[in-house]
Image (cartoon, rainbow, N blue to C red):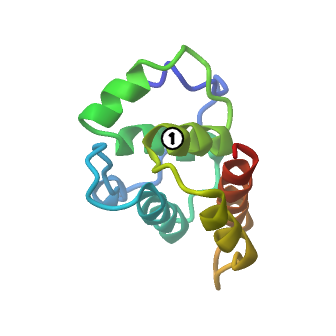
Amino acid sequence: MFQPLNIPSFLHPYPLDCYEYLPWFSGEKQASVEKHLESFEDFIDHFQIVHEDVIMRFFSKYLIRDATVWFKGLRVESIGSWIEFSNVFVKHWGENKSLDSYLADFYTLKRKQNETFPVFNQRFCSIYHGMCCH
């Protein structure tokens, strides 16, 4: 199930009683990829999940239907961090935003109240990498 993830052999346990609240992403364009990531990050924050291996394993479980097919088609052990995972995800599933759109996001970017630094850093990196690709 986790073959594309390059995670350590020692895995941190999942938090109890939170799997039922995990949001899902199928690949259908019902909401923006950014909104889906925000929903997943809210889940991570709410349950205070801090270990990267747990975040990455939860995110792979978050993917259903076409998104699961995409994930299983990735190279074995090709994803080594949450930031890398989220960037690969956005690159594949995200909309082609213009440079102006990325710049507007970048200039208005600030850390949200109660937002953990890893989550803020992921948003920053996603915007930054989007700008660099143009």
Can you say whether 75 is above or below 129 in the image?
above
Rendered residue at 37%/40% (across/down): 61
Direction top: furthest residue:
76
Question: What percent of the width, then of the height, locates residue 23?
Answer: 33, 57
Identify residue type, mark 1.
Answer: Phe
Pick the quarter of the image with the N terminus.
top left
21 above or below 111? above
Based on the displayed image, in which of its 4 quarters is residue 93 positioned? top left
Give whichever of 18, 93 is nearer the camera.
93
Name the residue beneath numbered marker 1. Answer: 89
Q: Residue 44 at x, y = what percent? A: 51, 61
Q: Where is residue 127 in the image (x, y as percent from the top left)?
A: 67, 58
Compared across the picture, whether 134 is left or right of 30 comes to right
Is residue 12 visible in the rendered structure shown here? Answer: no
Please state the horizontal and vertical placement of residue 116, each as a whole percent of the image: 68, 69
Question: Which residue sits at x=45%, y=59%?
Answer: 40
Query: Number of callouts in the render?
Result: 1
Q: Residue at x 66, y 50 (%)?
A: 130
Residue 9 in view: yes
Please identify the residue farthest to the bottom as the structure is shown. Answer: 113
Q: Which residue is drawn at 42% across and 18% down?
A: 73
